[in-house]
Image: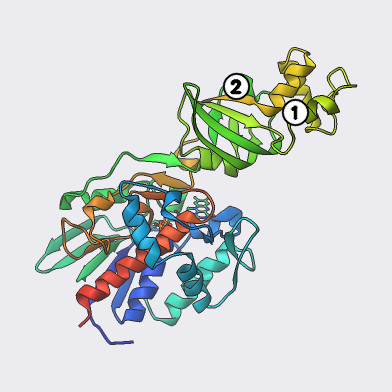
């Protein structure tokens, strides 16, 4: 490690902020992390249903939504899934993929990933300030002044890693964007993504709690926009589950969701299986009993129609459950306002990392990967510019 007394302040102690701090400290900088919450990495600890799906072996820019997916591709080629796994295993721990390429800590505990990063920050003596809500960021006299929660700090460079607007209970309500707007930055329209969908009540009545491994298609004016296979969980006001989260990136109010409730079985085979059965139990041992009864009712007691509904169960989208229940934010600071190292084109010395940028990924580890990719590149950029 080279000794480098340039001071770098990081706004936000989430996944991106913590990773960036580790990188910068290892480059030899004097690093401070300013986090409004009482602890670092609260959102990270909740990821992957508490199991911490950190990345995915099936990595590529096509998994992301952004104003510049080519830049995302360039950044991923530098700091991809293998580099992320290598970084984490370099801190200790073992990270393993499941059958779908989703990578988790072997312990399957997201909070342990947070602890791994916290342990490293403590080992490196990174200056961590929790309960510090940064409410002012000014550039003056060749440096930045950050203020908040009664304290003030000077820094040579700043990394803005304050997240987006999703899951406000983890400290991300979108208010931090106000800090960078005075520098001339814009923020694209923000929308909740990776979120459960609300559907017309008639479509889901009687199905709450039923889960299928379905093939989900999103249709707008009859045209298919997206399809994916995965969990579809019926809730009291719509659908949730990993297939729905992925589809939520495409679906809008008024769109139709067509769910194939039994994608591995053809309609032909369903007809054969139900040939000798009539009545509301004709789908016994084919679909969940409760689901079978609803299909029968919705088909008006017509077996062929009930079988057809198994293959194409329609739902009308009426909206999403909103930012509070979303895993990630669609939109943010456009990549076009940053250079290749994610430094602001408006104010030299101001860098960006994580969900605050206009980049969000599909469900399956892509968003934590982006936190790593962007934080690593920003740290490297700071090293290229400020190392003495
Ligand atoms: C329930 C849930 C499950 C998820 N599961 C997965 C998953 O399995 N895999 C995956 O890849 N992604 C998952 N995600 C998404 C992923 O967690 C986020 O995209 C990622 O954590 C973003 O990291 P970040 O550091 O950019 O932002 P955040 O983790 O949101 O961190 C930003 C931090 O900045 C702080 N902050 C904000 N404003 C200020 C301010 N003014 N001053 C000081 N601090 C401030 C906040 O308190 C927060 O701690 C999940 C998200 C949720 C909500």
Task: Compare marks 2 and 1 and give the one earlier in the sequence.
Answer: 2
Judged by depth in the image, the label closer to the viewer, 2 or 1, is 1
Q: What's the residue at 47%, 68% (across, down)?
A: 84
Image-quadrant location for residue 311: top right
Q: Is residue 320 above or below residue 185?
A: above
Query: The residue tagged with tag 1: helix, strand or loop?
Result: helix
Write down the residue under mark 2: 201
Total number of numbered discs in the rendering: 2
Indicate the quadrant containing the N terminus: top left, top right, bottom left or bottom right: bottom left
* Residue furthest right in the image: 276
Res 206 seen here: no
Q: What's the residue at 53%, 42% (across, down)?
A: 245
Res 225 seen here: yes
How did the renderer colour the structure?
rainbow
Q: How crowded is mark 2: few (under 14 residues within 10 Å), some or many (20 or more)?
A: some
- Please name whichever residue, 314 or 27, is drawn nearer the observer in this view of the structure: 314
309 relative position to 111: left or right: right
Write down the residue under mark 1: 291
Q: In this view, does 289 lie above or below 122?
A: above
Ligand 1 appears in which quadrant? bottom left
Q: How crowded is mark 1: few (under 14 residues within 10 Å), some or many (20 or more)?
A: many
Query: Distance between the Cα atoms at labels 2 and 1?
Result: 15 Å
- Please name whichever residue, 216 or 371, is drawn nearer the observer in this view of the structure: 216
- Please name whichever residue, 376 or 19, is drawn nearer the observer in this view of the structure: 376
Percent x, y of residue 335 = 28, 52
Percent x, y of residue 146 = 23, 63
385 relative position to 82: left or right: left
């Amino acid at each position: 490690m080279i000794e480098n007394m340039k001071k770098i302040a990081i706004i936000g102690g989430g996944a991106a902020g913590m990773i960036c701090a580790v990188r910068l400290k290892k480059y030899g900088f004097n690093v401070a992390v300013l986090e409004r919450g009482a602890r670092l990495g609260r959102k990270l600890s909740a990821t992957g249903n508490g199991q911490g799906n950190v990345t995915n072996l099936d990595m590529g820019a096509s998994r992301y939504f952004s104003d510049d997916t080519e830049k995302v591709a360039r950044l991923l080629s530098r700091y991809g899934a293998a580099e992320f796994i290598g970084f984490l295993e370099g801190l200790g721990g073992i990270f393993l993929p499941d059958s779908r390429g989703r990578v988790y800590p072997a312990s399957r505990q997201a909070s342990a990933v947070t602890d791994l990063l916290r342990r490293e920050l403590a080992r490196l003596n990174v200056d961590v300030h929790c309960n510090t809500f940064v409410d002012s960021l000014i550039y003056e006299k060749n440096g930045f002044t950050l203020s908040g929660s009664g304290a003030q700090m000077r820094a040579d460079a700043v990394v803005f890693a304050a997240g987006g607007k999703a899951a406000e209970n983890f400290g991300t309500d979108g208010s931090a964007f106000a800090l960078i707007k005075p520098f001339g930055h814009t923020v694209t329209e923000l929308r909740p993504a990776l979120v459960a969908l609300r559907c017309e009540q008639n479509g889901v009545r009687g199905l709450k709690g039923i889960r299928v491994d379905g093939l989900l298609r999103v249709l707008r004016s009859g045209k298919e926009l997206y399809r994916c296979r995965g969990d579809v969980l019926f809730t009291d006001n719509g659908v949730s589950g990993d297939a729905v989260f992925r589809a939520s990136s495409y679906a809008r109010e008024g769109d139709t969701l067509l769910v194939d409730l039994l994608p591995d079985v053809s309609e032909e085979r369903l007809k054969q299986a139900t040939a000798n059965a009539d009545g509301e139990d004709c789908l016994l041992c084919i679909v969940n009993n409760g689901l079978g009864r609803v299909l029968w009712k919705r088909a008006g007691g017509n077996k062929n129609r009930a079988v057809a509904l198994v293959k194409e169960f329609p739902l009308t989208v009426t909206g999403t459950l909103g930012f509070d229940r979303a895993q990630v934010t669609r939109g943010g600071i456009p990549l076009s306002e940053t250079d290749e190292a994610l430094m602001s084109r408006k104010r030299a010395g101001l860098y960006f990392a994580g969900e605050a940028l206009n980049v969000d990924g599909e469900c399956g580890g892509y968003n934590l990967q982006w936190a790593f990719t962007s934080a690593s590149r920003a740290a490297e950029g700071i090293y290229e510019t400020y190392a003495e």
